[in-house]
């Protein structure tokens, strides 16, 4: 998976997490809560549709790419125009920036990215790891982590982002990347939890699948 250009402008983000104050808008959670990527049923069904539609667009299993966005869970995904093959997907920078208006109007945050490995196993390649850190560096998701020790509760702001791999067999590999102030970037494998939702009940996934086939080209 290769991103053709920076997504920093899309996110309107900054990379410095060295904050000295706990901003009231950040939610407080225990770190263990980040070790499960929660995704709405609607967004998960969209992921499956994207993986399938990329296959149908080119008549064989190919990789595909999308961005996750939401609040405390993944509410939706969005895909740019992309060049795909059986073992590679590339997104031109201008196609990433074309998503800016849509994401701004959603009032949601980019929480990470996902891509398919066609009919291969799910894992991160060397290129995927580079992209994982790039997306992490160029997005700005923060949360206050509570730590309890005896009768004392300490708090620290951490920056985080998710990355994932799916395939046509519905296998998945989900990764959390996070960083404490002045700390090193760290990674953890996490679980995927599908959260029931009702907004997909009136959504036509067949029409969506046909519509997005135009986003995939060789």
Image (cartoon, helix red, strand yellow):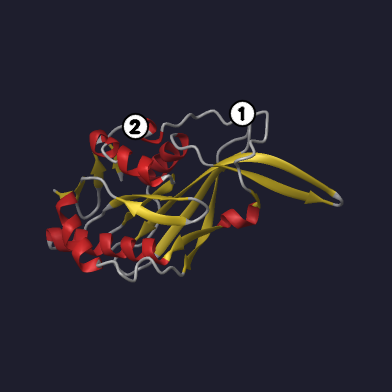
What residue is rendered at 40% in x and 63% in y?
Answer: 172
Q: Horizontally, is 177 left or right of 103 in the view?
A: right
Report which quarter residue 86 is drawn in: bottom left
The secondary element bearing badge 1 is classed as: loop
Q: Which of 88 and 40 is in front in this view?
A: 40
Q: Position of residue 58 (x, y in %)?
A: 13, 58
Q: Where is residue 202 in the image (x, y as percent from the top left)?
A: 30, 69
What residue is rendered at 49% in x and 50% in y?
Answer: 71
Q: Where is residue 45 in the image (x, y as percent from the top left)?
A: 34, 66
Q: Where is residue 72 in the image (x, y as percent from the top left)?
A: 53, 53
Tag 2: Cα neighbours inside 10 Å, few (<14), some, or many (≥20)? some
Find disc 1 in the rendering and name its residue.
18
Q: Distance between the residues labelled 2 and 1?
A: 22 Å
What residue is rendered at 60% in x and 42% in y?
Answer: 26
Q: Which of marks 2 and 1 is nearer the N terminus?
A: 2
Q: Horizontally, is 215 left or right of 41 in the view?
A: left
Total marks in image: 2
What residue is rendered at 41% in x and 31% in y?
Answer: 12
The secondary element bearing badge 2 is classed as: loop
Tag 1: Cα neighbours inside 10 Å, few (<14), some, or many (≥20)? few
- Is residue 19 visible to us here? yes
Find disc 2 in the rendering and name its residue.
6
Label number found at residue 29: none
Residue ranking furthest to the right:
151
**Are dots 2 and 1 in contact, CB under 8 Å?**
no
Report which quarter residue 52 is drawn in: bottom left
- Is residue 60 visible to us here? no
Report which quarter residue 119 is drawn in: bottom left
Q: Is residue 184 above or below residue 50?
A: above
């Amino acid at each position: 998976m290769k991103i053709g250009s920076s997504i920093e402008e899309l996110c309107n983000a900054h990379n410095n997490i060295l904050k000295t104050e706990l901003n009231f808008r950040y939610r407080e959670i225990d770190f263990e809560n980040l070790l499960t990527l929660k995704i709405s049923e609607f967004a998960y069904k969209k992921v499956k549709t994207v993986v399938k539609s990329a296959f149908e667009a080119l008549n064989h299993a190919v990789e595909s790419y999308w961005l996750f966005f939401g609040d405390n869970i993944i509410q939706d995904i969005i895909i740019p125009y992309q060049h795909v093959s059986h073992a590679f997907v590339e997104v031109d920078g201008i196609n990433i920036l074309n998503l800016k208006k849509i994401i701004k109007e959603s009032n949601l945050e980019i929480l990470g990215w996902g891509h398919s490995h066609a009919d291969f196993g799910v894992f991160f390649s060397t290129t995927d790891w580079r992209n994982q850190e790039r997306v992490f560096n160029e997005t700005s998701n923060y949360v206050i982590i509570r730590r309890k020790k005896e009768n004392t509760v300490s708090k620290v702001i951490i920056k985080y982002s998710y990355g994932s791999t799916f395939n046509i067999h519905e296998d998945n590999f989900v990764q959390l990347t996070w960083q404490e102030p002045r700390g090193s970037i760290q990674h953890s494998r996490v679980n995927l939890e599908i959260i029931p939702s009702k907004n997909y009940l009136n959504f036509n996934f067949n029409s969506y699948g046909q519509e997005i086939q135009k986003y995939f080209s060789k």
